[in-house]
Image (cartoon, rainbow, N blue to C red):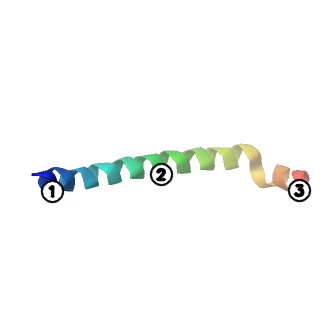
Amino acid sequence: MLKKDSTPCFPASLNAIIKVLIITIDLIQKLYHNIKPQQFQTTI
């Protein structure tokens, strides 16, 4: 019974992880667009 319950949980957790990754990638892309490479060079 436990094995049957645990197997369907794996795809659900993977979907949640994928959603989080997509959200983080979107945020990183927005940050890069806001910061721009020129400002990075000046700070360094």
State the image coordinates of residue 8 (x, y, percent, origin top left). Answer: 19, 52
The residue tagged 3 is 44
Could you tell which of marks 3 and 2 lies nearer the N-terminus? 2
State the image coordinates of residue 4 (x, y, percent, origin top left). Answer: 12, 54
Numbered disc total: 3
Q: Residue furthest left?
A: 1
* Residue at image point 45% right, 46% down: 20
The residue tagged 2 is 21
Q: Nearer the viewer, mark 1 or mark 3?
A: 1
* Residue at image point 37% right, 47% down: 16
Mark 1, Cα crowd under 10 Å, few <14 / some 14-19 / many 20+, is few
The residue tagged 1 is 3
Tell me: 5 left or right of 17: left
* Residue at image point 48% right, 51% down: 21
For badge 1, the amino acid type reads Lys
- C-alpha span from label 1 to label 2: 28 Å
Label 3 element class:
loop
Is the C-beta separation of discs 1 and 2 under 8 Å? Answer: no
Tell me: 8 left or right of 42: left
For badge 3, the amino acid type reads Ile
Could you tell which of marks 1 and 2 lies nearer the N-terminus? 1
Mark 2, Cα crowd under 10 Å, few <14 / some 14-19 / many 20+, is few
State the image coordinates of residue 23 (x, y, percent, origin top left). Answer: 49, 45
- C-alpha span from label 1 to label 3: 53 Å
Tell me: 38 left or right of 22: right
Could you tell which of marks 1 and 3 lies nearer the N-terminus? 1
Tell me: 40 left or right of 27: right
Label 1 element class:
helix
Above or below for 10 versus 27:
below
Label 2 element class:
helix
Image quarter hosting the C terminus? bottom right
